[in-house]
Amino acid sequence: MPGSLLAGQRSQGGVGKGLHGRDIKAASSTLSRRINRVPRTELGGDSGKLDQLWEYPNRQIKERVEAIKDPIERERQALAHGATNHGWRIRIADDIPSEDVSNVLAHETAHIFDEVAGQIPTKGIKKDLLKIYNDLNNLDLPQGSFQPRTVKFSGKEYKYPGKKKLLPSEIKPYPKKEDPFELWAEAIRAYMVDPNYIKSVAPKVAQRIREYVNKHPELKNIIQFNALAPVGVTGLLAEEHLSQQ
């Protein structure tokens, strides 16, 4: 679409090109009202976090609704109590090196794409989504040694399973119900940053993303994911082994 960002090849036979940091920032700025750098402690130890900006009728309702942990129920109750949604907010830990900010921003922006698209279904492609997620996040894949052990996250210890294929909730202590959202955020981030990689190792995932984003009435004017076949595997993301949640 004219005016939208293009993630992927520019011509038949060309090498797939990912979005630059400035492109990712442009997309996220279009979709979110605020992008803030905040202390990591404010994010519960995470590198980044996405939430929505709500205006509540009064403080009592605000405190009651924001105490709800489940995001879907929290949004439902906010609307039921007359709150007004003023859009998305992205917060990024202020100790993230400047060269890594775009990757965190891409992950959080990918969450918005998934939400706006109506939460993309994982049916039939979960194994491929797991491969992408583990390529980018599994602590043991680079060494090829898989040993259960205790690791720290946000100052707390938890048991790391040490397996070749792990769910997001096994890699970090997140609620299991968030697994599909984290799988899609990393897959969409991969398509934005290294389209050649995802079209090579998980073409069905790439196709599903195009189906839900490229024709979406709002998202199609912000980004287009190119469908041309990849040339080789760049491996950029896997080599960097980024974990930007």
Image (tube, helix red, strand yellow):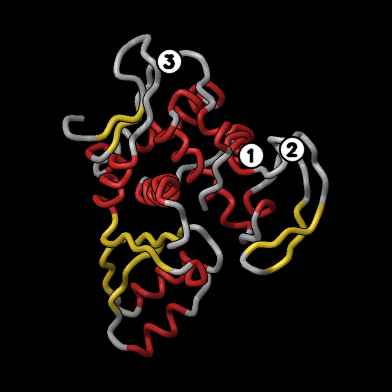
Q: Position of residue 92 (x, y in %)?
A: 42, 59
| Residue most extreme to the top | 13
Structural crowding at the residue carrying mark 2, measured as other residues with C-alpha within 10 Å and reported as few (<14), some (14–19) or many (≥20)? some
Residue marked by disc 3 = 229
Structural crowding at the residue carrying mark 1, measured as other residues with C-alpha within 10 Å and reported as few (<14), some (14–19) or many (≥20)? many
Residue 118 in sight here: no
The circle on residue 234 is none
- Left or right: residue 171 versus residue 18 is right
Question: Label 1 sits on what residue type?
Answer: Asn
Q: At 50% from the left edge and 22% from the top edge, which residue is drawn?
A: 234
**Residue 223's quadrant in the figure?**
top left
Q: Position of residue 167 (x, y in %)?
A: 66, 47
Mark 2 or 3, nearer chain start: 2
Q: Is residue 48 above or below residue 55?
A: above
Q: At 17% from the left edge and 30% from the top edge, which residue is drawn?
A: 2
Q: Secondary structure at mark 1?
A: helix
Residue 139 in sight here: yes
Question: Label 3 sits on what residue type?
Answer: Ala
Q: At 44% from the left edge and 39% from the top edge, which residue is drawn?
A: 188
Residue marked by disc 1 = 134
Tell me whether the residue at label 2 lies in contact with that at label 3, contact meaning CB atoms closer than 8 angstroms. Answer: no
Mark 3 or 1, nearer chain start: 1
Q: At 38% from the left edge and 37% from the top edge, which residue is drawn?
A: 212
Tell me whether the residue at label 1 lies in contact with that at label 2, contact meaning CB atoms closer than 8 angstroms. Answer: yes
Residue marked by disc 2 = 164
